[in-house]
Amino acid sequence: MDDIWDLVVVGGGPAGSAAALRARQLRPDARVLLLDKADFPRDKACGDGIAAHGHDELALLGLPDLIADHRPTRRLSIVSPGGARVDATVARPNHVVPRAVFDARLVEAARERGVEVRRHRVRALAVRHGHVVLDGTVTARAVVGADGANSVVRRLIGMPASPGRHTAIAVRGYADVPLDDDVQRIVMQGEGWPAYAWSFPVGDGSANVGFGMLLPRLRATGLPGRRVLHDRLAELLPHLPARDLRAHHLPLSPGRPGAGVGRVMLAGDAAGLINPLTGEGIYYALLSGRLAGEAATQAPDDPLPRYRGELGRALGRHLRTTDALALAARSPRFIDAAIGVAARRREVFDLLVEVGLGAGTVPPSLLFAVARRWLGEAVRGA
């Protein structure tokens, strides 16, 4: 029994590290192993945005000051496909921390808490005598698959990948900005909508910049994907020439993420936990990883039902809301209307931030206000 791990986590990103950290936080004697195919620090193509809700998760994990040395960003500017604009200060500040820094700090925090960290690429998974065996050598009572959008663990347990209609593709790089730039910018485009570019200043004279769109829309152009992504980023942010451009896929949440099979739980991108409206995923990763770590330690004999239930309670209504809004948002005029209302009503702006970056839902009164403006503009356009 000494060779059996209480929890093995595959993937050292935010979801995996959160699972390992939480397990040791709740059970300091738990044997926890964290596996990743790379050494840390390592780069990860991402927008690098850590919303206030993500900071809350770090506090719950006992790491309230993990990113305290990074400057908060308090202002947000959004331009809709039709040119509607809102510029406002967010209720709670966000942070922009390169994943090479953020992920390495999380892994190191897990190591300091007693988690064993190994570089290892998982290739096989089997269930034997009520345990999960990885690559024939690593035996665990529970496994968390947190190995990203192209999750090997997800494939090994027979769960399908995100369908094309629920997949986005983005390109990310870095650009030089004034040192005092503290505005997170999102610029949406009408052509090929849903699609938008972003600029998120890090605070050191650089900004994470990128462009993303739905994968079916990209394929419909009939052009090389690299050319489309790079050209549209340059068109929307012409004053911010980007370097170190890297592309990545985003499995967008379909409203009901796949939680796992048997003693294997999926978290973060591996579970398709990415906001379909904004592409935000770090908060979902930290939250789902924490809940998976809790389930592994508090319900060791059958962790999946507990994990599925807690994930539903934490994100169920929110994910169903974002799924419905993502369908409505296929109309650029709907987004124009939403941004137009947010520009006039502070409470609407705050709520849109909660839905896009946290776990908010939309009350019927707001839907009515946006729908009324949307229909009014449609009538005027006709």
Image (cartoon, rainbow, N blue to C red):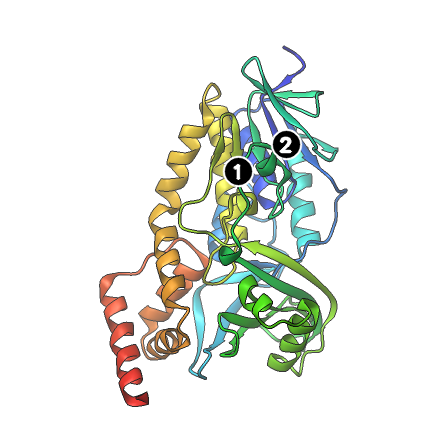
Instruction: Please indicate whether residue 161 sits to the left or right of residue 248 in the image.
Output: left
**Element carrying mark 1:** loop
Location of residue 271 in the rendering, given as x and y in whole percent from the top left corner: 51, 43
Location of residue 287 in the rendering, given as x and y in whole percent from the top left corner: 48, 44
The answer to whether residue 99 is above or below residue 231 is above
Q: Report the residue marked by disc 2.
A: 113
- The reply to whether discs 2 and 1 touch (Cβ–Cβ < 8 Å) is no
Q: Report the residue marked by disc 1.
A: 159
The answer to whether residue 139 is above or below residue 44 is above
Q: Where, quadrant-wise, is the N terminus in this rendering?
A: top right
Q: Residue at x 73, y 39 (%)?
A: 37
Q: Quadrant of residue 201?
A: bottom right
Kind of residue sitting beneath label 1: Met
- Foreground mark, 2 or 1, reads 1
Q: CA distance from mark 2 to mark 1?
A: 32 Å
Q: Residues within 10 Å of mark 1 (few under 14, many from 20)?
A: some
Residue 84 visible from this viewpoint? yes
Location of residue 157 in the rendering, given as x and y in whole percent from the top left corner: 56, 32
Q: Residue at x 49, y 30 (%)?
A: 261
The answer to whether residue 49 is above or below residue 60 is below
